[in-house]
Amino acid sequence: NNQVAPPVSARIPDYACQRHTPLQHHNTKFTDALEILEKYADLRYDDQDYSRALAFRRASCVLKSLSRPLSRLSEIQNVTHIGSHSQKVIQEILEDGTSEEVEKICADPWFQKMKLFTAIFGIGPARAKEFIAKGWSSIQEVRDGCTSSDWRIQWGLAFHEDLTTPVTRAEADYILGVVRRHVDRVLPGAVMELTGGFRRGKQTGHDVDILIMHPLENKIIGALPRLLQSLQSHDIVLCGRHERSTYHEELLTQNTKLSPRGQLDHFEKWIGIIKVPNKIRIKNDQSDKTSSHQLGNNKCNTDMKENKDKCENRNFQSDKNTDSCKRDVGNESVLYQRQEDTLDSGSAISDSLEDVWESLDKASSSSSPSHGNPREVKASQGDWIARRVDLIISPFSQFFYALVGWTGSKQFNRDARTYAEREMNMKLSSHGLYDFNQGKQLVASSEREVFDNLKLPYFEPQDRNC
Ligand code: ATP
Ligand code: MN
Ligand code: MN
């Protein structure tokens, strides 16, 4: 049979945000290799030349969006995003099944050490290179020799094994459930969304990203410090750092350069580590059973099935005039409406907001923003595992842009922002969309409207896995 499949190149749009990119695709043998080259370029050339790494990422992204396995190079020869280096590697794999260059990189001790060290929470390529220069090649050598006072590195080293054990979907749902309970106490009526890789359908992740919003714009003021106090008083938090919002409206139009490793936004957020009972991870495949978990002195019943259902993809509709936010779950519409603030006086939550801010700021500026020394906490670790959590709080008016930004993937965001700038004369960020043609901000009251405003077809989170 001499029939040649038509070239796929004609149908491939330029930007990843214009293409379906599912989690499961047909070209992993190529994309795995290209992503090793990306990682290597990223670690080798980091700050000076990220374009090399990006070139491999773009090529890999295109292959992920193909609806069938690539069988000959001619099918993609004219695709702009697949450069000559990537083509060479693809050709090699088509012919021999493997790429010699990639094999060499994988066997390179420098690369192995860099991957090992940059997997430590708080360690970037620059510091990893310092460790290698000192002659270290194991985590234990870093533990023995590293004198950094950075809280992330100290906790990252003490809990390295925990933090490099993939977080399961069941754990993410559990964490969402726990946070929801505390959010309901300190910020009734808030809407929460599990974002990041889990929202894109991944079964495991390196952390749990949770976006929080309240339909009433001003309600979120002080909510995150109260939430953290509530979590801390139940002995759930290991350590973390609270960051105040640095947002101001001029940022909407300012042309700030996108940082190579995921763009920074200006939301108030908390980056930290919490404890999750071991049984949650172990019971992963029975996650539809109702279970009850003992947390500190308080009994916390988490209905895993309910959480799971709530985490299915859904669309929001919101209405600023009625202080409500409608969410579609399947055929059902759930209306989120403002509730009376009912902080119970018996809780350990401080009445004075400034006190809360102060104590949190003090905690996060010290080297170990938590109770105790990381190594000692590790030595007396109970039946729980340490998990990385990001809590982000967004004003209602920015929520759907924040949702798109925090759902990712990073490459999806990168391309969506480049597309907005080059094709639409707009500026997209996690805070909003500014249209330079009209000289105004474009509001969105659903995720779909974010895409509409950009004149992009809508893609579900599970199709944004570029
Ligand atoms: P994993 O499953 O490994 O956690 P992930 O896709 O969830 O992968 P994260 O690093 O947790 O990756 O980031 C989640 C999303 O939030 C990404 O789309 C990323 O661009 C965005 N993001 C992460 N950190 C920041 C930050 N500091 N500021 C703004 N956006 C961020
Ligand atoms: Mn994540
Ligand atoms: Mn994260």
Image (tube, rainbow, N blue to C red):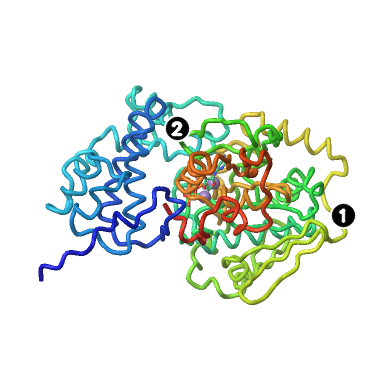
The answer to whether marks 2 and 1 mark residues whose Cβ atoms lie closer than 8 Å is: no
Which quadrant of the view contains residue 131? top left
Quadrant of the image for the N terminus?
bottom left
Mark 2 sits on what residue?
124
The correct choice, above or below, for 55 with respect to 21 in the image is above
Please name the residue shown 58% across and 45% down the image: 273
Q: Which mark is residue 346?
A: 1
Nearer to us: label 2 or label 1: 2
Amino acid at the residue labelled 2:
Gly
Ligand 1 neighbours mark 2 (CB distance < 8 Å): no
Callout 1 secondary element: loop
Residue at (37, 39) in percent of width and height: 54
Residue occupying image coordinates x 18% and y 56%:
72
Instruction: Please name the amino acid that badge 1 sits on.
Output: Gly
Q: Residue 170: x and y, percent?
A: 53, 64
Q: In this image, 420 relative to 303: left or right?
A: left
Q: CA distance from mark 2 to mark 1?
A: 43 Å
Q: Compared with residue 223, is residue 70 higher up or lower down, i.e. above or below?
A: below
Among the two numbered marks 2 and 1 on one chain, the one whose residue lies closer to the N terminus: 2
Most distant residue in the left direction: 1
